[in-house]
Amino acid sequence: MLIDLINQRKRYFAAQKAKAKRNKPMTQAQQRNYMMNYIKHMGSHTLQQLKRYSFDELKELFETTKKNVNTFVSMETEDRGRASELAAGSLQAQITDSVEVGSSKRGAEVGLDHEGSKKQKTNEASKSVQEQPDEEEKELPQEDLQ
């Protein structure tokens, strides 16, 4: 029984020593190597470029690269979101046109004309938007004079 107790304690302490070794923090050289590999694979740098940086510069670059990777939004999801918004807007315009006219065929024809009028309205709106900064520019010198 005494031998079993001693062997059991040896295994326990060996497990504790291995656990402490695994949980030990990385050295600065290990951290540098880890960050360089991460930036190489996720960023747009080569190892030769990264070797020139100091540890602090490399750490800042690592943090920015990691932030960019974690906040990544794919273009497909952005396009889908925009496409669904555009589709919803055009569908709603067609529905209102067909309700006004009463016929789906004529509603489609009116819908085409309606889109053309939208383009004209946006052109008129852009002209009014362009005129507004001119008025603001005229007002700024008067305020400066006062």
Image (cartoon, rainbow, N blue to C red):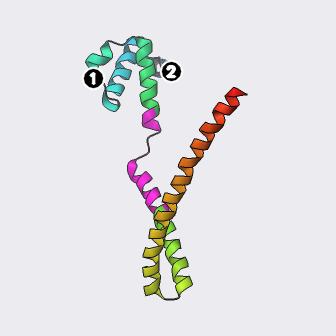
Residue 139 marker: none
Q: Relative to residue 59, is residue 75 depicted above or below?
A: below
Task: Tell me which amino acid carries mark 2.
Answer: Leu
Q: Are marks 1 and 2 in contact (CB under 8 Å)?
A: no
Closer to viewer: mark 1 or mark 2: 1
Where is residue 55? Give x, y as percent: 41, 12
Where is residue 44? Give x, y as percent: 31, 28
Q: CA distance from mark 1 to mark 2?
A: 55 Å
Q: Secondary structure at mark 1?
A: loop
How many circles with numbers are drawn on the protein?
2
Q: Relative to residue 74, is residue 92 depicted above or below?
A: below
Q: Magenta segment range?
A: 68-85
Q: Relative to residue 122, is residue 91 depicted above or below?
A: below
Residue 46 marker: 1
Front-lying residue, 132 or 26: 132
Q: Residues within 10 Å of mark 2 (few under 14, many from 20)?
A: few
**In percent of the image, x 46 and y 64: which residue is there?**
119
Residue 145: in magenta span: no
User: Is there any visible trace of residue 18 in the rendered image?
Assistant: no
Where is residue 128? Give x, y as percent: 56, 53
Give the left or right position of residue 93, taking residue 34 as reference. Answer: right
Q: Which residue is mark 2?
A: 5
